[in-house]
Image (cartoon, grey):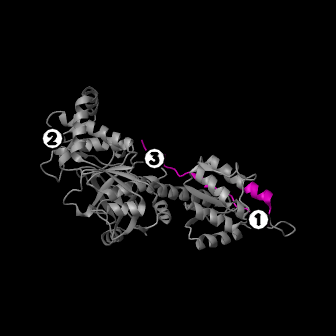
Amino acid sequence: MKKDKAAYLGVCPIGKFVFSHEDAIIQKNKIFKKFNEWKIKYAALEDILSDGIIRDQPQVDLAVEYFKKEKIDALFIPHCNFGTEGAAGMIAKKLSLPTLLWGPRDEAPLPDGSRLRDSLCGMFATSKVLHKLKVPFTYIENCRIDEKQFKEGVELFIGAATVSKAMRAMKICQIGIRIDFFWSTIINESELLDKFGIQILPVDMVEFINKIKNRSGKDRLKYQKEIAEIKKWLTIEGLEGDEPLFNSLAFRDELIFIAKERNLDAISIQSFNSLQNELGGATGLAEALANDTGIPIIDESDIHGAVSSVLLEASSKTDELSFLPDITIRHPENDNAVLLWHAMAPFLLRDNNSKVKLAPPWILKGLPASSLHYKLKDGPLTICRFDGDDGKYRLGIGEGHTVPGPYTQEFYAWMEVNNWPKWERTIIEGPYIHHCSAIYDHCADVLQEACKYIPGLIPQRFDN
């Protein structure tokens, strides 16, 4: 159910009449060969220009029209022999998409002292024009196409462009209203729409619960078989009968239905108390199962947390799912480690050796059995938090990794970072809360680079 997230790249090779045209074509073809090897989805100018290279100002509108028709998400302007800086700048300006600048490292002059290209010199000129036209861009240092700097730079840029794409026209469903005493999750919905194009699609809680109950009755036989299988791997404590489990599977299917019907990027839920009381519990089971299908499910009415998870999943080069824990207590022995705990995580992220239990919430006394209890797996982690006040928004970012730590109830992982006291102070003093989004990957650099292409969003690193 996860969307095809990778940015579609428009490749716009730049040349100039003053250097070798034959060598420019050789450099262009080397790029295409690499992109094909790396399975990068791209559009080129081969169908509209005889040589596929921009070499003159009158070719600007032709390239812009073609790339708009192709609906590219990002622009790559490799300088194949020198640079027609005005054309490169205007194409980037008119498309207003994330832009990548690079050129192949120039060889030594020929025996007669002449040179096939001056790619580096051309990029100095084009970068000035991009600055003049206020076009943000990513630059890969002048290197050979087989050097690691090129591949790493392309991956960083495509990741950043993918995050920028995810931010445009993001759709988040909000089920129920904000939890009354969670002042920390108050948001400005109008501002999110105006500044970032983020749409919040509300769902009435009463209607939602009625649809769950109708579905639970209609699909009884199917759910009965599934419940029998679930009981083979899930320990259940505190439920009276199977009715909450029937409702839970109907809850899961209603979440999946809404996500598909509305083409959602994430779902935020008023996770207590109405759902547990009306459905009899087991709500955490429904959310984790729905989360496993690829749609981020965000508890506790946290819209900013939903935005964080969408951006984080877009930044990752893996297919890992994100999860949304609370940052809670410091490790009892490791001064640079902290507990990531509870809220919501898909089953796919649990430790293979950890048993799974459905039981009453540990801290919300009186609610029916609705919380999941298991240890999360080990691995590298990136933390992300989109947040802001007074019209000023930041993206807090940092990397860490799991470490051993004591057992605690509900789902959990212990994360070690480079300098927890610095993290702690930054989170406290920034516009952030205890919720964060996390993913099993290191992709903080991609998120930081992506902020170039999201006007009004300032990156803030927790880890440097």
Q: Position of residue 337 (x, y in %)?
A: 33, 62
Quadrant containing the N terminus in the rendered view: top left
Q: Which mark is residue 319?
A: 3
Confirm whether residue 354 shows in the render: no
Type of amino acid at the residue the image marks with label 2 = Gly
What span is colored magenta in the figure? Answer: 1-27
> Which numbered disc flags the more N-terminal residue, 1 or 2?
1
| Residue 21 covered by magenta stretch | yes
Residue shown at 28%/46% (left/top)?
Answer: 374
Most distant residue in the left direction: 366
Residue shown at 39%/65% (left/top)?
Answer: 396
User: Which of the pair 404/300 is nearer the observer?
Assistant: 300
- Give the mark toward the camera: 1 or 2: 1
- Up the image or down, 351 lies above or below 110; here it is above
Secondary structure beneath disc 2?
loop
Type of amino acid at the residue the image marks with label 1 = Arg
Secondary structure beneath disc 1?
loop
Crowding at mark 2 (Cα within 10 Å: few <14, some 14-19, many 20+):
few
Residue at the spot of label 2: 238
User: Which of the pair 350/27 is nearer the observer?
Assistant: 27
